[in-house]
Image (cartoon, helix red, strand yellow):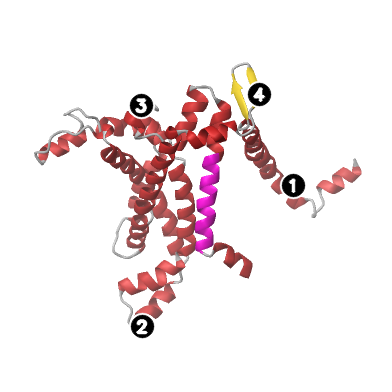
């Protein structure tokens, strides 16, 4: 007992005591489910029947045209969100950090507010906005320009427009705050030195802001790649389920949900989830290598 008390009050044990809750939660909620999913991906799991099928689930995925379409949809959505949700929030953050904007706190709160809104509520509202009915907000907007109503959620191009509108509405403010925090860490003396050397606003942004925002940009890029590939709820709520016309809104996670929850094929759904994990990891490792992230760590 005395030895245990001595151990608990020891300075050497203190760091391990502090990190123990994280290690336990990480093991229970991440490591165990991951290994369990790997095991399930090699099984056929049906109600009352579990049997090993080796690589059959992965072989089926190679020939599954619906899964290939889900990958294509997720990739397109990810690329489009990267194009919209990195440069524009960075630009907005630069403007917000300048002296051009008054009431900065109010604008930050207003831009961050959509991220706090339930996706279920937001998806329902956007589904009504993009309804094919003549009275929907988007079709009323078109009528002002003498354009016929559009079946927004039944066409591929317009349905992506709806999905990207939700994504921009929800995440522009969040990404802007990331970039704003990065801008706060840049020494203002660098801008003053650039002004003395005759640099204009564009040159200061290109040669001071952009290079020093690189760590923040890499972080936003990394989480945006994963968020784009793992998008599900927005699509699910926009089409009121997992049944968009010709699967135009089907994503990888949507297909995982369809197989695992709707069809009760947990083994096959586990294989889908692991493929998604592999794709997200591969893309992020490649972009981190290209950005020189690992090279910097080696120098340190």
What residue sits 51% from the left and 53% below the top?
284
What residue sits 56% from the left and 35% below the top?
58
- 135, above or below 281, in the image: above
Q: CA distance from mark 3 to mark 4?
A: 34 Å
Earlier residue among tags 3 and 1: 1
Q: Position of residue 95 (x, y in %)?
A: 32, 61
Question: Which one is in front in this view, the residue at disc 4 or the one at disc 2?
Answer: 4
Q: Position of residue 136 (x, y in %)?
A: 20, 31
Q: Going by the picture, which residue comes out furthest to the right? A: 2
Question: Which one is in front in this view, the residue at disc 3 or the one at disc 2?
Answer: 3
Earlier residue among tags 4 and 1: 1
Q: Residues within 10 Å of mark 1 (few under 14, many from 20)?
A: few
Read off the residue under disc 4. Answer: 51
Earlier residue among tags 3 and 2: 2
Q: Give the numbered dot on residue 150.
A: none
Read off the residue under disc 2. Answer: 196
- Is mark 4 in CB contact (under 8 Å) with mark 2? no
Earlier residue among tags 3 and 4: 4
The kind of secondary structure element at disc 3 is loop
In the image, 117 versus 69, the foreground residue is: 69
Residue 16 belongs to magenta span = no
- Predominant SS along the magenta part: helix
Q: Residues within 10 Å of mark 4 (few under 14, many from 20)?
A: few
What residue sits 45% from the left and 43% below the top?
229
Q: Give the numbered dot on residue 17.
A: 1
- Is mark 2 in CB contact (under 8 Å) with mark 1? no
Read off the residue under disc 3. Answer: 240
Q: Position of residue 159 (x, y in %)?
A: 29, 37
The kind of secondary structure element at disc 4 is strand
């Amino acid at each position: 007992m005395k030895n245990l008390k001595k151990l608990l009050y020891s300075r050497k044990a203190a760091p391990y005591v502090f990190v123990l809750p994280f290690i336990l939660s990480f093991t229970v909620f991440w490591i165990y489910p991951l290994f369990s999913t790997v095991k399930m991906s090699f099984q056929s799991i049906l109600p009352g029947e579990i049997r090993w099928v080796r690589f059959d689930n992965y072989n089926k995925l190679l020939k599954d045209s619906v899964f290939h379409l889900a990958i294509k949809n997720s990739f397109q959505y990810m690329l489009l969100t990267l194009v919209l949700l990195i440069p524009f929030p960075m630009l907005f953050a630069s403007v917000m950090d300048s002296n051009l904007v008054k009431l900065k706190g109010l604008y930050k709160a207003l831009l961050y507010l959509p991220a706090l809104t339930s996706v279920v509520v937001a998806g329902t509202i956007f589904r009504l906005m993009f309804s094919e009915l003549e009275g929907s907000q988007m079709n009323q907007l078109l009528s002002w320009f003498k354009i016929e109503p559009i079946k927004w959620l039944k066409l591929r191009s317009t349905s992506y427009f709806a999905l990207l509108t939700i994504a921009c509405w929800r995440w522009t403010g969040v990404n802007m705050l990331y970039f704003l925090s990065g801008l706060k860490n840049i020494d203002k003396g660098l801008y003053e030195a650039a002004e003395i050397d005759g640099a204009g606003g564009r040159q200061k942004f290109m040669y001071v802001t952009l290079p020093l925002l690189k760590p923040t940009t890499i972080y936003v890029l990394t989480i945006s790649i994963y968020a784009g590939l793992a998008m599900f709820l927005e699509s699910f709520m926009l089409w009121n389920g997992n049944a968009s016309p010709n699967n135009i809104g089907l994503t990888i996670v949507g297909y995982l949900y369809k197989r695992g929850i709707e069809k009760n094929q947990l083994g096959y759904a586990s294989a889908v989830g692991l493929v998604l994990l592999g794709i997200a990891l591969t893309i992020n490792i490649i972009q981190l290598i290209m950005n020189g992230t690992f090279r910097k760590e080696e120098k340190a």
